[in-house]
Structure formats: C-alpha cells, structure tokens
Amino acid sequence: MSRKENKGKNGMKRRDFLKVIGVAGGTAAVAGSCSEPVEQIIPYVIPPENIIPGVPKFYATTCRECSSGCGLVVKNREGRAIKVEGNPESPINRGKTCAMGQASLQGLYNPDRVRSPLVRNTETQRLEAIGWERGEGILTEKLNSLGSGKIVYLSNNVSGTYSKFVAEFLRPLGGKHYVYETFSHEPIRKANSIVFGRDEIPSYRIDKADYLLSFGADYLETWLSAVSNSIGYSKLRDIDHGKTGQVVHIEPRSGMTASNADTWVAAKPGTEQYLALGIANVMISKGLNKVAPGPIARMVSGYTPKKVAALTDVSTDTIEKIARDFASSKSLAIGGGAANTGSNATETMVAVNILNYLAGNIGKTVDFSDSLSISDANSFSDMKKLVEEMRSGKVEVLIVHNVNPVFTLPGELKVAEALEKVPFVVSLSSFLDETSEKAHLVLPESTSFESWGDYSPKKSVTGITQPVMRPVFNTKSAGDTLISVSKNVEALKNTFAEKKYYDYLRSAWKKRAEALSPGTSFEKFWKKLLVKGSVTTTPAPVNVALSSGVSSVSFSDPQFRGEGDFHLIAYPSHRFLDGRGANKPWLQELPDALTTSVWDSWLEINPAVAAKMGLEDGSYVKVDTPGGSFEVQVFVYEGIRPDTIAIPIGQGHTSYGRYAKGRGVNPFALLPAATDALSGGPSLLSTKANVSSLRKRDLLVRTQYTKSQGDRHVAKTIALDQIGHHNGAHGAHHSEHPDFYPEIEYSKYRWGMAIDLNKCTGCGACVTACSAENNIPFVGKKQMAKRREMNWIRIERFFEKNSDGSLDVRFLPMLCQQCGNAPCEPVCPVFATYHNHEGLNGMIYNRCVGTRYCANNCTYKVRRFNWYTYKFPEPLNWQLNPDVTVRSKGIMEKCTFCVQRISYGKDLAKDEGRLLRDREVLTACEQACPSDAIVFGNLLDDKSRASVLSEDDRGYKVLEVVNTKPAITYLKKVKQERV
C-alpha cells in the first residue's frame, strides 16, 4: 500500500507518531509504558528528557511468539522498536533467539494488522470499522443478556497473572477458560502421570547430558523450547580432551534435528515404542540398568532385540549398541514430534520414561522440580468437546484470543461450521485470520510489544512483558478491554477495582514482591524487575518414584486410516510453527533448512519411489487421503523412508494477510480428528495416503538447487579420533604462491570470525537477525525464482554419504568472507568496494553504478544486487535501522560484519581512551545464534575467542586454494562412530 493509499487508514502517520512519542515523559523512560494518550503536542525542537536523537534505549520484555517465553531486549530509537535481541539475564534463552523471535517485530509493524474495532454488518455480512466505545458497548450488551455458563474464553497459553485475571472475569458469568496450544505435548504429560504419578512436563536438561537419544522429538525446531534446547545441544557438542557428546535420533524422516544427529535411525512409522522397549530389554538382560527395574522387567521381557528388529526395521546390532552406550553415559531420552503423535503416542512416551528411569536420569537430566507451564494447556480431546458444544448451541458467547482453531484443528472437525452455530463470536486477535474473519465483533489486541503482562514458561521463571513503544494502531490490550467492559456488566461490576490491566498486574506483583525480595520497597523491586525482565526462583526438589500404574500399560500397534501406500507425516515448521508465523515476510523468505524452499509447500518423497513414479524436484502430485486431497510439488529427499511421505505445516492460509494468504497447502485440513486414546492428544500420524503424478512440473523455488558439494570440499568433516593427530595446518595443504603486492598490515584491528560447523544446526536465526539489523528487503517468490534473493547470509546445505552409505547432512553459513586478497575489489571501476584499514571489504553505496563486476568475480557468491528499489509497506518501514543505509535500485550490497555496531562500540571505547575489548561488539548473526556456532572478534588479539578458535586444529578456510585469504575460519564438523 502506498503512502497516498494509506492516508487516513493508518490511524497515525510516522511523522505524527514521532511528534507524539517525543512527549512521553520521564515515566516512560523507566517503565516503557506508552499507553496513555497525550493531551498536548510539544514541538520536537524541544528535546524530551527521555529521548536523545541517535541514542538507543533498551527495554526488557518476554517473547510471545510461542510458548517458550524467551527473554528479550528490544532496541528503541526515537520511539520506534527497531531490533529484538535475546535477554542475557533470562535463564530460558540466555541472550539467544530463534528466527521467529527475530522476525517478531514484523508482527508489530505488519501492514495487515487490524487497525481498529470491527463489527459485522448484518446486511452485507462484512466487517466494518467502528470506535472502541461502540465496540465495547456491543460486547457489554451481549454479556448483560447472557445466561450463566454460556460463555467460553478460548486463548493460547497465558500462564501467570493473566490466567488468574481471566478466571476472575469468567467466574461471575459461569464461564470456562480453554487454553489451546496446537502442540501441547499431551502424551508426555500423560506418560509422566502413568509412570511417575506427575501430570506435567519436566525440564529436559540436554546441557547436562553427553548422550542424547531422541524418539522423534524435534528439539532444535519446535519441541518444547527450541532455543533453550539449542543452547544445551551446543554444550553437548563441546569438545573436551578429545571427547564430545553423542546424539542418536529415531524417526521415519530426517528433519533438521535428525540431520544434526550423529546417527539417524529410520524406524518404521509408529514403532518407536517397540524400539525403546527393546533397548530397555537389553539394559536389564545385560545388567546395564542403574536402578532396580521392579515391574518394568516383566513389561519388557518379551521385547527381545530379535523381535523388535522385525517390528521396527532396525537391526539387532543397532538396538544393542544404543542400549550399551545409553546405559554407560550421562544420558537423556526424549520423545515427541509429529512422527510420534499417533494412536499409541502415550505408550511411546511411557517407553521413553522407562529408559530414563532405568538409566537413573530422573532428577538429573529429567527435572520434575521445574516443570513447564504448557502442562496447563487443555488437551485435544477437550477441544473436540468444545467444538461439539459450539455445534449443539451450548455456547452463546465465544471470546477467541490469539488462537486460530479454524486453521489449526483437523478439517474433519469442521470448526468453521461450528462457529456459525455460536450466536456471538468475539475475536481479540491482531489479525483477520481464518477464525477472526468469522467473528461478529473484533476488538483488536495490542501486541505484546505494546502492552503489559507477564508469563511463566516454567515454575522457576516469570518474565515481564512491557510496552516497548506506543501502539502502532488504534488497539488495546485484552486486559484493558475486559476491564473496561466489566465496569458496565451487571454481573462484573465489582470484579475489578482497577481501571487498567497495568494496575491489576502491579497489584498481583505487590503480593509476590515481599516473598521474592524481603525488605525491598515495591517501587524499587518493580523497577528492578522491568530492567532485568524476569524473576527467577529456585524450585523445591521433588521426590519422583515409579508409580504402580506403570504395570497396567499395554503396548499396541499404531492405527492408520485409509488404504494408501504411504504414511503421511505432517510436521510443524521451525519458521511458522503451526502457521502463526506465515504472515511475516522474513520468515517466508527464510529458506527451509533441508529443501531451501521459500514461499511455498512441498511434499518430501524418497528417491526410489520418485524414480519409479517418474518424479523430479518440482513435479506436481496429487495426494489422496480419507479426508480429501491436495496438489503439491515434490522434493525428492533421501532422508525419508520409502513407505513415508511428509509435508510441513504452516502454509495454506485462506486469509491472515497478504504474506500468508494463498501460499501452499494446509495439511490440517485433511487430517482426521483422531486421538491418542490414553492422553486425548491429536493423532497426527494416523493417515495413509496415495500419491499420483499429475504429469506436470514447475520450478520449486529454492535458494540452493544443488544437493551435493561434489569434490569442492566446502563443508568439511573430521573424525573425532583424528583431532590433534595431524600437523595443525588449516585446510588443504597447498603450496605457497607469491603475491604481487605486499602483505597488508593492520595496526589495531583485523576483524574476523570463527564458525563451528559442529554446532551450526541450520536453523536460520542468523539469517533473519541479519535482515532485521541491516534493513535487508524481502523480494517475494517471483524474484526468488529468478535467483534475486537479498539475504546477506545463506545456509548452504549439502547431502553427502557416510562410509556405510547413510545420509550425511552438512550445514554451512556462507557470508562475505572479508577477504584479505578480495577478488571483488580490483574489478570495481569506480572504487565502490574497497579494503579498509581494519580488514573489512567496505562498500560506498553512492559510488556504486551497478556494473556487477564484483559479484561476478566473487569466489563465494555472497554479493547481492538491488534489481529494484524494494519497498517496505508502511508501517513495516518503521522498523528500519537508522544506522544502516537503505539501498536503492542498481546498488550492490553484502555483509559488512555489522560495521555500524563496530563503529558504535569503538566510539564508546574511544571515550574511555582504550581499544575495544573482546566480546564488546557482537554481530547480529552471532548474537542471535542459539547454538553459539558463530564467534566474531579481533584476530590481532591473540586472546580473543575468535582468534583462538581460528587457530583450532579443526580450522580451515573455504576454497583457500584460490588465495583470497578469508577472514572467516570454519571449524570442521566432527564425525563419530555410528551406531
């Protein structure tokens, strides 16, 4: 939408916004609250005391993109939130973020947000804009005429104060609160109840393990807390005295998580429970268990390696090897993921619990004292009951808050039809998604970046959510809306004494403050909380014992609907989760880790099957299931069994904004409403499908079309037992070639990087962080198809072969290497690219005339050309970093090692009369990377972390033979003995 088209629709223009934010006053400088309207405009020529132009402010808050609850620090410039970083004070993510977190500000500034309240016109059936007074008045009228027990509040996971607030709101009305998370891991909770008598999800301490055995849990992508898991994974991958942790992943499909394991075991779909029982059998029969088995011995006695091998397609040698290694290590077994959400999902989790119990992991790598808040979510069975109540007319008012059940619940439930049976549906969503567009009234909520709140991701941690800027549009927090409405509802008049949710929140924290910080005044405590962003307590230890109920569990084969030839796996995307991230263009343009596909859906199919059917990458197929059919393009992939096909979840929206609508397919629409009998969780792995070729093919748009690196040795590996056993020279040993020019000498700084391929998981957080920091535009699917992507970092993915013929996936972040002998520099006819005195290949944008000679001569193909002056539709342009030039048509660009951050850090150090210290400046990619694979620093400082790692025995330079003298050293991925 152009500025002209947007006039009058936006509520507040950017220039007006800056005038208003300039008078926020001193209170906002401390609290970050910008929710009160100003009474008088003061010209910006009189600088407000809390805003100094050019000087950033930082606010601590909590990420609400998923249920993990990572701590964030938001950078604010001149009243605009421009960059999100992880909060180092948060025990959840320790300063790291994922791609969804990095792109979260595109939700705040999304041009397709609901900008004011909407009501459905009874004649045209269209939603029309109204004011807040009328909107709240309509809801008030409905609640006053409502019978007791006829209202339901349906929300995402809102632990903490808001959960108590909703309960107080609903109590006088006799209403129910349903907490809905698409992936709430019910089988884990139920299995813990059966085995240990604890209906909760514990903290799984990957950081304390040196042997990780995963039964389908995509812990690096969407399982529980991906950032926290990645931090633990990074520690597990540390190399100490020639030793490192080992990872085994069991699943029919090798996703991003399985690709980072030392061994991927491709078990038959739905048989993981038998494999776990077989491992337990070996542990007990060989005397490897560390805890007396009790009734478990009888339970697993029949699952001998020979029997389990026949059931799972996994060899007896593999079963026995896993059992020995698991029992002899500081181990951890975890389970879950899409491939383990079948009709026997809880049985699989029971088997996983048995392994942890026998290995003595309870209380060590499995911590029940600090359970996760997602344990409080309602089950899928509860949601099915709610849909039936809606359909039968038992619900008169439904308030939907930050969930999209029409899109995320199985199509068999026909949620959209059930919604039509509800007399009055209210949406508190920020977007017109598939559910909100069917509402009678939309009271748009301010995002978490514009409102007050708190959130407890687990027992020991509660994070604060505070406004980091004024609301972009005419929106209100859900709490403020409900308090305002309650003042005029007869049954609710005496419920809340507070006028604003902020007051309610402070009152709740006042009750906790004395216990958390004895002897401290509340105002001092509150200010410290806002600065730090969270409160952490030490959970009391709990005694966990084997429950007598474990012996009652029987194990069964998975049940599948349909007579098709293939098991269909629909798996959550680490970019979109259940589809909630699909309206953010940076996530759409972030390549999938394995396929490198963008802006679309695809179907993964085994090469042998594809060859038999005459299919290639990009071929269109029709997938038929009992729930219907869809057409989709194929990606031929060795990392999937021949009897299995897989499709990612997240695309296929019919609304939800311009970036999400009409892209790909939604597998939820074809899934049955089957459940896991024991837990009531969804049975996603419950469908067998047929695949037929449509005899047509088109380009499956990707950023990488080659699957193997050939003989180029770009992403290298080294055997664990070979570390330290060669001469220590980097990379391949080529003869020295004399240079025509003398070696460049650097006096104070030579900036460089070390990237550890043993830790890089291919998650893409670095890519999105770079885009957010450096104003990198998104170009769309058509331009991506023409290879005109603009991302400064690309994650190269290579499919290689292990010595036994199994799949070996390697990830390598490729960015400008800041070469000491850069081939791009001498070919530029206007000296737009040059070598500066600190070793950076600089760019002078206003010199560039767009010859593209530099890109043609770049060995690493990391330069990007602006074919157009790409637009950021307002208000997306509000997020642009004012410290970085926005490039226009005809300009070449590339990675700068975040030179603006270097300059800012040097200015601060200069004021103190010193050089920059190590780790004082972090590049955006390094700061985000959850697995700590990227390290930036001064190579002239022998003690800097980057310098030390650059001299590591595993270090090498990519394509060093061409004598470009890169400043980036890659550390080879470590190969271990496969099971």
Image (spheres, grey):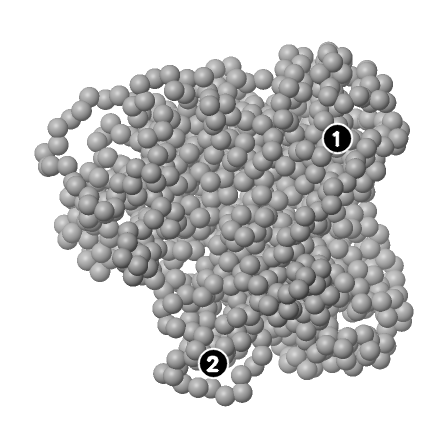
* Residue matched to label 1: 353
Q: Quadrant of residue 483?
A: bottom right
Can residue 371 be seen here? The reply is no
Q: Indicate the position of residue 596 as horizontal and vertical percent values.
A: 47, 39
* Residue matched to label 2: 23
| Residue type marked 2 | Val
Q: Quadrant of residue 939?
A: top left
Q: Say what secondary structure mark 2 lies in.
A: loop
Q: Which residue is found at the position 42% from the left and 34% from the top? A: 756
Can residue 933 be seen here? The reply is yes
| Residue type marked 1 | Asn
Q: Which residue is found at the position 77% from the left and 40% from the top? A: 542
* 612 w.r.t. 62: above or below: above
Q: How far apart in space, not on screen, are marks 1 and 2 (Cα)?
A: 57 Å
Q: Indicate the position of residue 11 as horizontal and vertical percent values.
A: 53, 77
Foreground residue among 34 and 249: 34
Q: Say what secondary structure mark 1 lies in.
A: helix
Q: Residue furthest front?
A: 519
Mark earlier in primary sequence (1, 2)? 2
Q: Indicate the position of residue 763 as horizontal and vertical percent values.
A: 50, 41
